């Protein structure tokens, strides 16, 4: 920071005297530096002077993930000034407040301004009426995809009651507090201040008689309830580690001669030979050559190392290998943050389940009730999203081959929809099929391989079919990811994928045990919400362009209409059946697709 050549400080502290024990003030400082005016505003709060005549102000309830601002810059001169004045300031405010306490009770309340003077400081204390004090804080414990929790959340929102929500599927470390405060792990559990109200049933009881009892409980609420989750604090997680493998990997990273080499008339960067790995294990750990080869195969299977061309598993000889963090694609993976985890890979289904619960919690807090509009700006600043991004690193070395067909379908449907949210926040969203190609290249490192939005949709979920306006399939014949491609294409996947636009199906997540049924429900809901229009007079059917872009997935146009009937409500199904049954001509017209973001 450049030296302040000319500066003056005018500081004003506004302290509100409430009815329980803390004073909030704001500090404003104007400084001039080299002829340019800089203005810094710092919001400070401090607990001072607990007394029966003072009331603790109820701070505006913090959103579930809110924290103190992290963009406040405090110049060093200001910090030094504050340190010098700290003691004087506290003493002055204490003396000033004491004079207010001893005022005659019968005297009329002074709603004006009382001024204290310090050298270089002016402190103003204003009395605030009891009627203007903010409502007591409401908080409740919840879980993702809980209907009763959703009803509680909706109740508070409809009445514009601010609340703090602690989702124990996201903030796992808070489940212990839930048990200690309530004696069980069931949710929802609602608190007014520090008093446990109960669940949805108890809340409905308070709603009776026009909500008078609810208002009374809120007025009488005292104490501190469950604290809002703080931003930037992770839960303590014990990682399972294979000690033998971990020691081997650490030694290999330090001692293998990793360098650029030539193979098949190509320069292969950051690699080593299989024989070098075996020799190092034999010399350093004393393993037999056969044991060293077996360890090399384990390292390949667990995605610590890969063959540079992905052709073979580990073999001793001149075959070249590289660590996963040295792969050319790694810098483009948005769940890679410089290093890979050496812990034992978690089960793929468990990782996906946890990520899905976090993303569901995000949508419940920051999307509209119908999930048609998503607040991406608020999501990007939330603690839930920060934890989601951190947890995506667990995908790097999971074993995807252990998933069943339905588990694979649900895994990639959910991951695609979650990645869309991440992609919009990180890289933005282009309009149009062709312009969105760069957006579709947004990718994660999953199971040792890169998976972009495009390869997940077209390579996995569409059974390795070409995307619109593309000439080649996502996976070639030698691509290891081809093993994960679904055997049979289910056209309903198009209604389970949200691409972040207003015309796409809404964002949702699926259970591996009910994924087929949930996809059918998604299709029905899409067609109910203007996904199809039937003009009986003009004998024209208006369809989403999805059917044109992916016509190969649905069949000929007349077959498409017959297929759609199964997912229409009775009225639309009757109209469409009538048009198809009278033998007359039926025209299909495709709607204009709205590419704007669903925010």
Image: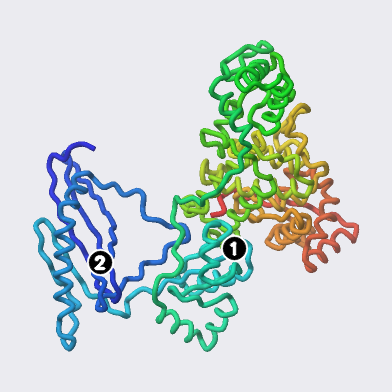
- Would you place residue 191 above or below residue 384 in this image? below
N-terminal-most mark, 1 or 2: 2
Horizontal relation, residue 209 to residue 512: left or right: left
- Would you place residue 50 above or below residue 589 in this image? below
Horizontal relation, residue 552 to residue 310: left or right: right
For marks 1 and 2, give the CA distance: 36 Å
Say if residue 546 shows up in the picture. yes
Horizontal relation, residue 587 to residue 419: left or right: right
Q: How many marks?
A: 2
Residue at 70% of width from left, 55% of height from top? 510
Residue at 56% of width from left, 80% of height from top? 202
Nearest the camera: 107 or 543?
A: 107
In the figure, residue 335 lies in which quadrant? top right
Numbered badge on residue 143: 1
Nearest the camera: 124 or 235?
A: 235
Q: Position of residue 261 (x, y in %)?
A: 61, 13
Residue at 62% of width from left, 52% of height from top? 354
Badge 2: residue crowd in 10 Å (few <14, some 14–19, many ≥20)? some
Q: Position of residue 589 (x, y in %)?
A: 74, 51
Nearest the camera: 488 or 96?
A: 96
Q: Position of residue 67 (x, y in %)?
A: 40, 56
- Farthest residue toward the front? 286
- Give the secondary structure at mark 1: loop
- Would you place residue 239 above or below residue 495 in this image? above
Badge 1: residue crowd in 10 Å (few <14, some 14–19, many ≥20)? many
- Would you place residue 397 above or below residue 526 in this image? above
Numbered badge on residue 111: none
Nearest the camera: 254 or 400?
A: 254
Q: Nearer the viewer, mark 1 or mark 2?
A: 2
- Give the secondary structure at mark 2: loop
Horizontal relation, residue 194 to residue 487: left or right: left
Residue under pointer 2: 48
């Amino acid at each position: 920071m450049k030296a302040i050549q000319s500066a003056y400080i005018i500081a004003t502290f506004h302290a509100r005297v409430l009815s329980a024990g803390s004073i909030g003030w704001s500090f404003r400082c104007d400084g001039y530096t080299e002829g340019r005016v800089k203005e810094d505003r710092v919001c400070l709060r401090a607990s001072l002077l607990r007394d029966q005549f003072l009331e603790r102000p109820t701070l505006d309830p913090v959103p579930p993930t809110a924290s103190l601002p992290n963009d406040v810059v405090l110049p060093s001169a200001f910090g030094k000034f504050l340190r010098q004045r700290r003691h004087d300031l506290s003493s002055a405010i204490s003396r000033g407040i004491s004079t207010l306490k001893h005022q005659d009770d019968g005297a009329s309340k002074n709603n004006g301004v009382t001024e204290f003077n310090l050298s270089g400081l002016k402190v103003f204390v204003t009395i605030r009426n009891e009627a203007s004090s903010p409502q007591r804080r409401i908080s409740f414990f919840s879980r993702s995809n809980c209907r009763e929790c959703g009803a509680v959340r909706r109740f508070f929102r409809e009445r514009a009651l601010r609340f703090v929500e602690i989702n124990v599927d996201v903030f796992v470390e808070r489940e212990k507090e839930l048990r200690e405060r309530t004696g069980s792990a069931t949710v929802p559990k609602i608190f007014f201040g520090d008093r446990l109200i109960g669940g949805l049933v108890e809340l409905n009881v308070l709603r009776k008689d026009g909500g008078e009892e609810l208002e009374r409980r809120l007025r009488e609420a005292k104490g501190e309830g469950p604290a809002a989750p703080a931003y930037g604090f992770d839960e303590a997680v014990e990682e399972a580690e294979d000690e033998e493998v971990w020691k081997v990997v650490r030694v290999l990273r330090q001692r293998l001669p990793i360098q650029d080499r030539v193979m098949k008339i190509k320069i292969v960067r950051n690699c080593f030979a299989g024989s070098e790995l075996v020799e190092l294990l034999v010399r350093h750990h004393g393993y037999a050559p056969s044991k060293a080869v077996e360890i090399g195969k384990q390292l390949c299977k667990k995605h610590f190392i890969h063959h540079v061309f992905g052709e073979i598993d580990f073999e001793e000889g001149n075959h070249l290998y590289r660590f996963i963090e040295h792969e050319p694609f790694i810098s483009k993976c948005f769940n890679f943050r410089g290093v890979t985890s050496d812990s034992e890979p978690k089960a793929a289904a468990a990782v996906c389940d946890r990520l899905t619960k976090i993303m569901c919690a995000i949508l419940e807090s920051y999307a509209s009730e119908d999930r048609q509009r998503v607040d991406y700006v608020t999501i990007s600043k939330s603690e839930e999203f920060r934890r989601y991004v951190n947890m995506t690193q667990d995908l790097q070395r999971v074993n995807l081959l252990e998933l069943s067909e339905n588990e694979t379908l649900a895994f990639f449907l959910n991951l695609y929809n979650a990645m869309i949210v991440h992609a919009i926040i990180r890289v933005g969203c282009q309009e149009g099929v062709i312009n969105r190609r760069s957006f579709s290249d947004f990718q994660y490192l999953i199971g040792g391989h890169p998976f972009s939005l495009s390869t997940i949709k077209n390579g996995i979920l569409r059974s390795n079919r070409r995307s619109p306006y593309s000439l080649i399939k996502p996976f070639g014949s030698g691509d290891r990811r081809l093993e994960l491609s679904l055997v049979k294409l289910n056209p309903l996947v198009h209604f389970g994928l949200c691409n972040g636009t207003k015309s796409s199906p809404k964002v949702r997540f699926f259970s591996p045990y009910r994924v087929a049924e949930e996809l059918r429900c998604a299709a029905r809901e899409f067609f109910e919400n203007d996904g199809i229009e039937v003009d009986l007079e003009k004998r024209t059917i208006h369809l989403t362009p999805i059917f044109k872009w992916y016509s190969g997935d649905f069949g000929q146009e007349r077959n498409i209409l017959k297929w759609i009937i199964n997912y229409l409500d009775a009225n639309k199904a009757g109209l469409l059946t009538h048009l198809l049954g009278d033998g007359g001509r039926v025209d299909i017209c495709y709607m204009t697709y709205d590419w704007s973001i669903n925010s």
